[in-house]
Image (tube, rainbow, N blue to C red):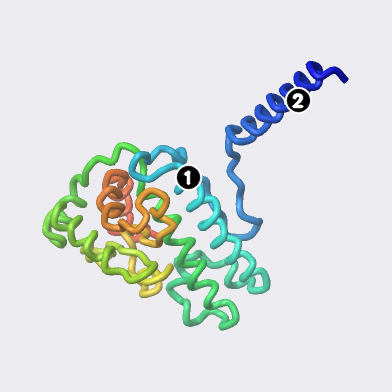
Amino acid sequence: MPLATTSFVTRRRFVVGTAAVAAVAFAPRSFAQAPAGPFKLDPLPYANNALEPHIDARTMEIHHDRHHAAYVTNINNAVKDHSKVAAMPMQDILAKLPEMPEAIRTVLRNSGGGHANHTMFWQLMGPGGGAPQGELAAAITRDLGGLQKFQDDFNAAGLRVFGAGWVFVTVTRDGKLAIETKPNQDTPLMDKKHVLIGNDVWEHAYYLNYQNRRGDYLKAWWNVVNWKNVGDRYAAAKTGKLTI
Protein backbone atom coordinates (compact mmCIF):
# COMPACT_ATOMS: atom_id res chain seq x y z
CA MET A 1 0.00 0.00 0.00
CA PRO A 2 1.41 3.47 -0.90
CA LEU A 3 2.57 5.59 2.02
CA ALA A 4 -0.06 8.29 1.45
CA THR A 5 -2.86 5.71 1.53
CA THR A 6 -1.47 4.12 4.69
CA SER A 7 -1.31 7.53 6.37
CA PHE A 8 -4.91 8.28 5.39
CA VAL A 9 -6.18 4.94 6.78
CA THR A 10 -4.26 5.47 10.02
CA ARG A 11 -5.72 8.95 10.45
CA ARG A 12 -9.20 7.69 9.63
CA ARG A 13 -8.94 4.91 12.22
CA PHE A 14 -7.76 7.42 14.80
CA VAL A 15 -10.68 9.78 14.11
CA VAL A 16 -13.24 6.97 14.19
CA GLY A 17 -11.73 5.52 17.36
CA THR A 18 -11.69 8.92 19.06
CA ALA A 19 -15.31 9.52 18.12
CA ALA A 20 -16.31 6.15 19.53
CA VAL A 21 -14.60 6.90 22.85
CA ALA A 22 -16.27 10.31 22.98
CA ALA A 23 -19.66 8.77 22.25
CA VAL A 24 -19.28 6.45 25.22
CA ALA A 25 -17.93 9.17 27.50
CA PHE A 26 -20.75 11.61 26.78
CA ALA A 27 -23.64 9.19 26.36
CA PRO A 28 -26.57 9.82 28.75
CA ARG A 29 -26.15 7.82 31.96
CA SER A 30 -28.93 5.35 32.64
CA PHE A 31 -29.92 4.81 36.25
CA ALA A 32 -29.13 1.27 37.36
CA GLN A 33 -31.41 -0.21 39.99
CA ALA A 34 -30.00 -2.38 42.76
CA PRO A 35 -30.77 -6.13 42.43
CA ALA A 36 -34.37 -7.15 43.02
CA GLY A 37 -35.67 -7.53 46.54
CA PRO A 38 -38.11 -5.97 49.00
CA PHE A 39 -35.96 -2.85 49.47
CA LYS A 40 -35.60 -0.46 46.54
CA LEU A 41 -33.22 2.27 45.47
CA ASP A 42 -35.31 5.15 44.18
CA PRO A 43 -33.77 7.46 41.57
CA LEU A 44 -32.66 10.89 42.68
CA PRO A 45 -35.53 13.40 42.57
CA TYR A 46 -33.31 15.81 40.58
CA ALA A 47 -30.44 15.65 38.11
CA ASN A 48 -26.94 14.75 39.33
CA ASN A 49 -25.73 18.28 38.57
CA ALA A 50 -28.70 20.06 40.15
CA LEU A 51 -26.81 20.88 43.36
CA GLU A 52 -23.72 22.34 41.72
CA PRO A 53 -21.51 24.17 42.58
CA HIS A 54 -22.08 23.09 46.19
CA ILE A 55 -22.16 19.34 45.48
CA ASP A 56 -20.79 18.22 42.13
CA ALA A 57 -22.48 15.81 39.72
CA ARG A 58 -19.76 13.16 39.95
CA THR A 59 -20.04 13.01 43.74
CA MET A 60 -23.82 12.66 43.51
CA GLU A 61 -23.50 9.87 40.94
CA ILE A 62 -20.97 7.88 42.96
CA HIS A 63 -22.75 8.53 46.26
CA HIS A 64 -26.20 7.48 45.05
CA ASP A 65 -25.53 4.90 42.33
CA ARG A 66 -22.68 3.08 44.09
CA HIS A 67 -22.66 3.67 47.84
CA HIS A 68 -26.42 3.75 48.38
CA ALA A 69 -26.98 0.97 45.84
CA ALA A 70 -24.51 -1.23 47.72
CA TYR A 71 -26.45 -0.77 50.95
CA VAL A 72 -29.68 -1.84 49.25
CA THR A 73 -28.00 -4.86 47.68
CA ASN A 74 -26.57 -5.91 51.05
CA ILE A 75 -29.96 -5.67 52.76
CA ASN A 76 -31.77 -7.63 50.07
CA ASN A 77 -29.13 -10.35 50.19
CA ALA A 78 -29.35 -10.50 53.99
CA VAL A 79 -33.13 -10.89 54.18
CA LYS A 80 -33.51 -13.49 51.41
CA ASP A 81 -33.91 -16.27 53.96
CA HIS A 82 -35.74 -14.17 56.57
CA SER A 83 -39.20 -13.54 55.17
CA LYS A 84 -40.57 -11.90 58.33
CA VAL A 85 -37.77 -9.34 58.34
CA ALA A 86 -38.10 -8.79 54.59
CA ALA A 87 -41.76 -7.84 55.09
CA MET A 88 -41.00 -5.18 57.72
CA PRO A 89 -40.62 -1.45 56.95
CA MET A 90 -37.02 -0.32 57.39
CA GLN A 91 -37.87 2.05 60.26
CA ASP A 92 -39.36 -0.88 62.20
CA ILE A 93 -36.32 -3.06 61.55
CA LEU A 94 -34.02 -0.35 62.89
CA ALA A 95 -36.21 0.38 65.91
CA LYS A 96 -36.21 -3.32 66.78
CA LEU A 97 -32.62 -4.06 65.84
CA PRO A 98 -31.82 -6.06 69.02
CA GLU A 99 -34.70 -8.39 68.11
CA MET A 100 -33.43 -9.10 64.59
CA PRO A 101 -31.76 -12.46 63.79
CA GLU A 102 -28.20 -12.35 65.06
CA ALA A 103 -26.77 -13.64 61.78
CA ILE A 104 -27.96 -10.56 59.86
CA ARG A 105 -28.10 -7.95 62.63
CA THR A 106 -24.81 -6.27 61.70
CA VAL A 107 -25.79 -6.00 58.03
CA LEU A 108 -29.15 -4.52 59.00
CA ARG A 109 -27.44 -2.02 61.28
CA ASN A 110 -24.85 -0.90 58.75
CA SER A 111 -26.61 -1.21 55.41
CA GLY A 112 -30.15 -0.75 56.76
CA GLY A 113 -29.05 2.37 58.56
CA GLY A 114 -27.27 3.53 55.42
CA HIS A 115 -30.39 2.96 53.33
CA ALA A 116 -32.61 4.90 55.75
CA ASN A 117 -30.12 7.74 56.16
CA HIS A 118 -29.53 8.18 52.45
CA THR A 119 -33.20 7.91 51.48
CA MET A 120 -33.84 10.78 53.88
CA PHE A 121 -30.75 12.68 52.67
CA TRP A 122 -31.72 12.81 48.99
CA GLN A 123 -35.21 14.03 49.88
CA LEU A 124 -33.84 16.89 51.99
CA MET A 125 -31.95 18.49 49.17
CA GLY A 126 -32.74 20.26 45.93
CA PRO A 127 -31.95 23.38 43.93
CA GLY A 128 -33.41 26.64 45.13
CA GLY A 129 -33.01 26.15 48.86
CA GLY A 130 -35.26 28.76 50.42
CA ALA A 131 -35.67 29.26 54.16
CA PRO A 132 -37.66 27.59 56.95
CA GLN A 133 -41.21 28.88 57.28
CA GLY A 134 -44.14 28.76 59.67
CA GLU A 135 -44.14 26.24 62.52
CA LEU A 136 -40.75 24.88 61.50
CA ALA A 137 -39.12 28.31 61.69
CA ALA A 138 -40.76 28.90 65.06
CA ALA A 139 -39.50 25.56 66.37
CA ILE A 140 -35.95 26.32 65.21
CA THR A 141 -36.08 29.61 67.10
CA ARG A 142 -37.64 28.05 70.20
CA ASP A 143 -35.49 24.93 70.49
CA LEU A 144 -32.27 25.74 68.62
CA GLY A 145 -31.79 29.48 69.14
CA GLY A 146 -32.70 30.68 65.66
CA LEU A 147 -31.51 29.72 62.20
CA GLN A 148 -27.97 31.08 62.39
CA LYS A 149 -27.20 29.60 65.81
CA PHE A 150 -28.76 26.32 64.75
CA GLN A 151 -26.63 26.13 61.61
CA ASP A 152 -23.47 27.03 63.53
CA ASP A 153 -24.18 24.41 66.21
CA PHE A 154 -25.12 21.78 63.62
CA ASN A 155 -21.91 22.42 61.67
CA ALA A 156 -19.82 22.28 64.86
CA ALA A 157 -21.43 18.95 65.78
CA GLY A 158 -20.67 17.63 62.30
CA LEU A 159 -17.03 18.65 62.66
CA ARG A 160 -16.77 16.77 65.96
CA VAL A 161 -17.79 13.45 64.40
CA PHE A 162 -14.61 11.37 64.40
CA GLY A 163 -14.12 9.53 61.14
CA ALA A 164 -17.39 8.63 59.43
CA GLY A 165 -20.90 9.43 60.62
CA TRP A 166 -23.87 11.77 60.52
CA VAL A 167 -25.19 14.87 62.25
CA PHE A 168 -28.96 14.93 62.73
CA VAL A 169 -31.85 16.97 64.02
CA THR A 170 -34.38 14.77 65.79
CA VAL A 171 -38.03 15.72 66.16
CA THR A 172 -40.59 14.54 68.70
CA ARG A 173 -44.32 14.06 68.17
CA ASP A 174 -44.93 17.45 69.83
CA GLY A 175 -42.44 19.12 67.48
CA LYS A 176 -39.42 19.56 69.78
CA LEU A 177 -36.06 19.65 67.99
CA ALA A 178 -32.59 18.55 69.10
CA ILE A 179 -29.18 18.08 67.45
CA GLU A 180 -27.32 14.79 67.82
CA THR A 181 -24.60 12.84 66.04
CA LYS A 182 -24.15 9.17 65.23
CA PRO A 183 -21.14 7.15 64.04
CA ASN A 184 -20.98 5.19 60.80
CA GLN A 185 -24.52 4.58 59.43
CA ASP A 186 -26.25 4.56 62.81
CA THR A 187 -29.44 6.62 63.01
CA PRO A 188 -31.71 7.95 65.76
CA LEU A 189 -34.31 5.53 64.36
CA MET A 190 -32.39 2.87 66.28
CA ASP A 191 -33.33 4.73 69.48
CA LYS A 192 -36.99 4.90 68.39
CA LYS A 193 -36.62 8.62 67.59
CA HIS A 194 -37.63 10.46 64.43
CA VAL A 195 -35.24 12.32 62.16
CA LEU A 196 -36.09 15.74 60.76
CA ILE A 197 -32.85 16.29 58.84
CA GLY A 198 -29.37 14.83 58.68
CA ASN A 199 -26.12 15.55 56.90
CA ASP A 200 -23.70 12.85 55.80
CA VAL A 201 -20.13 13.52 56.96
CA TRP A 202 -18.61 10.38 55.47
CA GLU A 203 -15.80 11.48 53.14
CA HIS A 204 -17.59 9.95 50.14
CA ALA A 205 -20.19 12.72 50.50
CA TYR A 206 -17.75 15.55 49.83
CA TYR A 207 -14.16 14.46 49.14
CA LEU A 208 -13.99 15.09 45.37
CA ASN A 209 -14.65 18.82 45.84
CA TYR A 210 -13.68 19.52 49.44
CA GLN A 211 -10.97 16.92 50.22
CA ASN A 212 -10.25 17.23 53.97
CA ARG A 213 -12.20 20.51 54.35
CA ARG A 214 -15.29 19.07 56.02
CA GLY A 215 -16.11 22.44 57.55
CA ASP A 216 -16.39 24.05 54.11
CA TYR A 217 -18.69 21.25 52.97
CA LEU A 218 -20.91 21.62 56.05
CA LYS A 219 -21.29 25.35 55.40
CA ALA A 220 -21.96 24.88 51.68
CA TRP A 221 -24.56 22.18 52.31
CA TRP A 222 -27.09 24.69 53.61
CA ASN A 223 -27.33 26.11 50.09
CA VAL A 224 -28.94 22.89 48.87
CA VAL A 225 -31.34 22.19 51.75
CA ASN A 226 -34.91 22.12 50.45
CA TRP A 227 -36.73 23.80 53.33
CA LYS A 228 -40.13 23.09 51.81
CA ASN A 229 -39.44 19.36 52.09
CA VAL A 230 -38.06 19.80 55.62
CA GLY A 231 -41.26 21.63 56.55
CA ASP A 232 -43.28 18.74 55.16
CA ARG A 233 -41.25 16.31 57.28
CA TYR A 234 -41.88 18.46 60.35
CA ALA A 235 -45.63 18.42 59.72
CA ALA A 236 -45.53 14.63 59.18
CA ALA A 237 -43.67 14.17 62.47
CA LYS A 238 -46.35 16.09 64.37
CA THR A 239 -49.10 13.95 62.86
CA GLY A 240 -47.23 10.67 63.48
CA LYS A 241 -46.70 10.00 59.77
CA LEU A 242 -42.94 10.52 59.48
CA THR A 243 -41.12 7.26 58.69
CA ILE A 244 -37.51 7.53 57.55
Q: Position of residue 93 (x, y in %)?
A: 49, 71
Q: Residue furthest front?
A: 3
Q: Residue at x 28, y 41 (%)?
A: 129
Where does residue 155 sit, x and y in percent of width and height? 24, 59
Label for residue 58? 1
**Distance between the Cα atoms at labels 1 and 2?**
35 Å
Pick whichever, 182 or 90, lies toward us: 182
Q: Which residue is mark 2?
A: 10
Secondary structure type for disc 1: helix
> Which amino acid type is shown beneath numbered disc 1?
Arg
Mark 1 or 2 closer to N-term? 2
Which dot marks residue 121?
Answer: none
Outermost residue on the right side: it is 1
Left/right of residue 77 with respect to residue 56 in the rendered view:
right
Q: Residues within 10 Å of mark 1 (few under 14, many from 20)?
A: few
Say few, some or many: other residues with alpha carbon within 10 Å of mark 2 (under 14 / 14 to 19 / 20 or more): few
* Above/below status of 161 relative to 207: below
Mark 2 belongs to which amino acid? Thr
